[in-house]
Amino acid sequence: MEDANRKVILALAVPVAAFPAIFIVIIAFKFLMSGGGETVLSEAQALSKLASPRIETMVRSEAPGAIAPGAVLALDGLGNVFVGWARNIVEVRSRQPLLAAEDPGLSSFAATPEGMIMTVRGDRLGYVAAGSVVDKVALPSSQMRLERIAPDRMILYGPVSQKTWAVYLLAGGGSYTKLFTFPGEISAVAGAEGGMIFANSWGIYKAEFGKRISPVLYLPDKPGIRSLAYDAPHRAVFFSTADSVFLLIDGRVVKLLGNVSGTLRLGPEGLYILSETRQELLRVDNIFKP
């Protein structure tokens, strides 16, 4: 491998301190992010921590369907926001596409803290360079999704059989190690203290590296969760369903926004929502009281 390419792949190098590959059973009850043992506050106490959310449209599509269902949204560590837009990757601040031409095979991407864009196209892991996608590493399937869950950790997740999904941790050289399998589709993932949280159609779970998988919340009466974001300072989970954005804080679920949904990412300037129904990128701030 050329030195330049090797440097790109090695930028993902992370210590593989992963928990053993395990298969978890379906667990159906509410559980706190801590794994239990904390007092669940009343709804009024939870609401008392929230301010009045402000919504700002950062960019709006002029072409119908440019933001497709399940569109990708990524943030790096330099303040840049990247959106999956019309089969391309667009940097929001400059409004410039990163690819010289549309790439219909591009299905997922994530940004490293330094601003490098890692990609999934078909069954290959790669990166963006000189206006195109460079494919490098073979993946377990052609339906893998890519997500950065910490500054030094990036994962892949996707189906490995008809009924089973798996999560992999990327390591040096573009290799990956299976962390765990799950009996059903994983609809969303996000980083959290000590590991990650993930969701499926019936709830949210937390996976701690080297330790265990614990249920966080069971949602039998709500539509499937589409996206997740985790706020570490407030120990709060944002999640979106088909038409709303909710907040799980202090053991209580609060509706944050109605009639809006999409892909969520949390950044220093607030919560970002990439909405295919509204065909725009929103930023929400003033969520929590000082």
Image: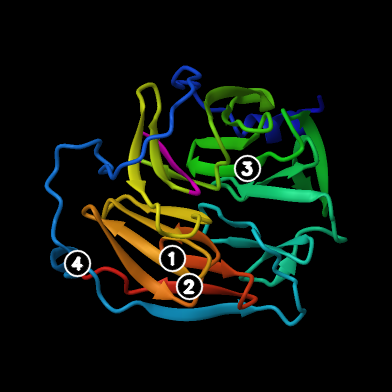
- Work out whether residue 280 or residue 254 is closer to the camera in this orientation and state it: 254
Judging from the image, what secondary structure is the residue with disc 3 in?
A: strand
Residue visible at 48% across and 72% down in the picture: 283
- Write the residue at 49% across / 66% down: 272
Q: Residues within 10 Å of mark 2 (few under 14, many from 20)?
A: many
Decide: marks 2, 1 in contact (CB < 8 A)?
yes
The image shows residue 107, relative to residue 7, as above or below, that is below
Please name the amino acid that badge 1 sits on. Answer: Leu
The picture places residue 151, in percent across and down from the top left corner, at 48, 41
Distance between the Cα atoms at labels 3 and 2?
22 Å
Magenta part, dominant SS: strand
Under mark 3, the amino acid is Leu
Q: Magenta region: which residues?
A: 193-201
Residue that badge 2 annotates? 283
Query: Which residue is label 4 attached to?
Result: 49
Q: Give, as a three-letter code, the residue at label 4.
A: Lys
Left/right placement of residue 158 relative to residue 201 reads right
Q: Earlier in the sequence, mark 1 or mark 4?
A: 4
